[in-house]
Image: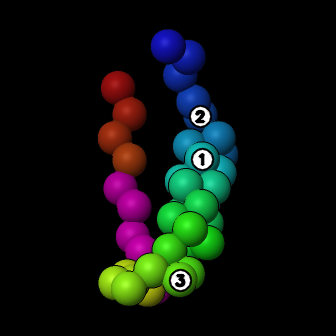
Amino acid sequence: MAELGPPETIEQIRQELWKAITEGVDADIQFPAGTMTLEFQAG
């Protein structure tokens, strides 16, 4: 498994969030995305 650096990790998270938002646009139950805080641990 390849390791991702911080920019790649953040971009992957953005893509996953956007996918979830767009796929859930017509869902009966929705969870709006707001401000998020991420913590990363290296090592």
- Count of numbered circles on the image: 3
Identified at 61% across, 72% down, the residue is: 22
Which region is colored magenta? 34-39
In this orientation, does residue 35 appear? no
Residue type beneath disc 2? Gly
| Quadrant in the picture for the C terminus | top left
Q: Residues within 10 Å of mark 3 (few under 14, many from 20)?
A: few
Counting residues from the N terminus, which is met first, the one under dot 2 or under dot 1?
2
User: For this view, does 35 lie left or right of residue 41?
Assistant: right
Q: Does 13 sit above or below residue 25?
A: above
Q: Which residue is mark 3?
A: 26
Q: CA distance from mark 1 to mark 3?
A: 23 Å
Q: CA distance from mark 2 to mark 1?
A: 11 Å
Q: Which mark is residue 12?
A: 1
Q: Which residue is mark 2?
A: 5
Identified at 55% across, 55% down, the residue is: 16
Element at label 3: loop
Q: Residues within 10 Å of mark 2 (few under 14, many from 20)?
A: few
Element at label 2: loop
Q: Which mark is residue 1?
A: none
